[in-house]
Image: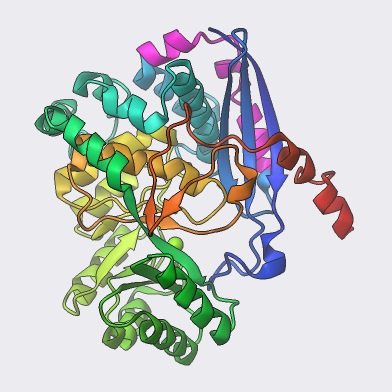
Amino acid sequence: MRIRGLEVLDLRFPTSRTNAGRDAVHLDPDYSAAYVILRTDGGLEGHGLTFTIGRGNEVCAAAIDAFRHLVVGQRLSDITEDFAGYWRRLASDSQLRWLGPEKGVIHLALAAIVNAVWDLYAKSERKPVWKLLADMTPRQIVSCIDFRYITDALTADEALEILERQARTKADREAELLRSGYPAYTTSVGWMGYSDERIRALCREAIAEGFTHFKVKVGGRPEDDRRRVRLVREEIGRDRTLMVDANQQWDVAEAIARVGDLASFNPWWIEEPTSPDDVLGHATIAKAVRELGIGVATGEHCANRIIFKQLLQARAVDFCQIDSCRLGGVNENLAVILLAAKFGIPVCPHAGGVGLCEYVQHLSMFDYIAVAGTMEGRVIEYVDHLHEHFEDPVVIRRGRYVAPTRPGYSITIREASRLEYRYPDGEVWLEKV
Ligand SMILES: [Mg+2]
């Protein structure tokens, strides 16, 4: 099977009209996808996307198109037989790498393509991506990873050892996953633009739906943060878990003070307290807030496996928040999942956005079966927006992700939605003008 065509779409959903997704830093997100369709001579299509929040999505789409010479004409089996080599060719194209390397728009674009290849691969094997990964031998998994720049923290042999430790008992965990799903937490109760009444109502709804973990956006005025966090704590009671997320709002000392200010509400973690590039700043914050029993979570804006490596080496994070398309697709996520396992840090993926819940469920399910061997202390983010646009949307039952069974990466957006939300000429955007 050969890839014969690459189509790129700029899709945008006008979520800013309802304040969905609003936090301290991103005031008016229109959840968007730079969307790729790989067409093959066999008739199968591979779909992939990378996530942005509106303006500039066209830049991502253009960057995806810049990889065309490395995609069209490729045979799928040639890619998958040396997946790490193919990933390296994309990430280290001798001219494109100047735009990164391995960060920013060009890396987001790479992720869309890599994920589309995995969708195609999984469909050709008639398995969902999590199952395709879970069925691979430790050696096959390791052969998908480019270990360049991380061997000081994790070698291929060490990765192999981690995977081999879990290999014999994979079937038991797969059965458990199919039986009980994977724990989720909800971010949908605590967006910044919501009224107190709305937050209370959403908390009650989420409790009725079986959620046990709730995240609230902070980083606004101190008194507002305190009021909103108190309100959620009141609604969910002492026994459920609360997390707070500052979306990079604070400087280091400010973060320590502001988290201290919220400590009496007993948050499990503070997410993105400061700049995502500030490894040592995260380490300073983590050291201070751990004394209060609070962990540091970050990752949705970590550009690549090297930054994750440093965060782990510096003991700067307590929760590793991989992102399916900020990192360079499945392959680089495998590297970070194994790095986290080496350092004993739980992986709790970021999934606020469009399509990210659909994506990351596969990565966490693989992590459970083949790497971590446990779901203990691990949760996948869940937001309840935009799932209706997907052909194979996530299913949440009693606050847990149900394992998808359809072949592929669950990321195909329905054709009618692709037409309606295409920017700037889809119906939903023409209406606005
Ligand atoms: Mg976040």
Residue 290: percent from the left, percent from the top? 19, 73
Which residue does the image show at 38% across and 65% down from the upper left?
A: 210
Q: Is residue 147 toward the left or the right of residue 420 in the image?
A: left
Q: Is residue 10 toward the left or the right of residue 294 in the image?
A: right
Which residue does the image show at 43% across and 70% down from the upper left?
A: 208
Residue 106: percent from the left, percent from the top? 55, 37
- Between 187 and 291, the residue placed more toward the observer is 187
Q: Is residue 332 toward the left or the right of residue 41 in the image?
A: left
**Magenta run includes residue 72:** yes
Residue 388: percent from the left, percent from the top? 62, 48
Regarding ligand 1, which quadrant of the image does it lie in?
Answer: bottom left
Identify the image quadrant of the C terminus.
Answer: bottom right
Q: In this view of the protein, can residue 62 be seen by the observer?
A: yes
**Magenta run includes residue 397:** no
How many numbered badges does the structure rendering display? Answer: 0
Q: How is the image coloured?
A: rainbow
In terms of image quadrants, where is residue 11? Answer: top right
- Between 395 and 226, the residue placed more toward the observer is 395
Q: What secondary structure do most residues of the magenta stretch adopt?
A: helix
- Between 17 and 335, the residue placed more toward the observer is 17
Residue interval drawn in magenta: 58-81
- Between 168 and 103, the residue placed more toward the observer is 168
Which residue does the image show at 82% across and 52% down from the upper left?
A: 429
Q: Is residue 366 above or below residue 227?
A: above
Which residue does the image show at 42% across and 29% down from the upper left?
A: 128
In terms of image quadrants, where is residue 42? Answer: top right
Residue 394: percent from the left, percent from the top? 49, 46
Q: In this view of the protein, can residue 305 be seen by the observer?
A: no
Residue found farthest to the bottom: 223
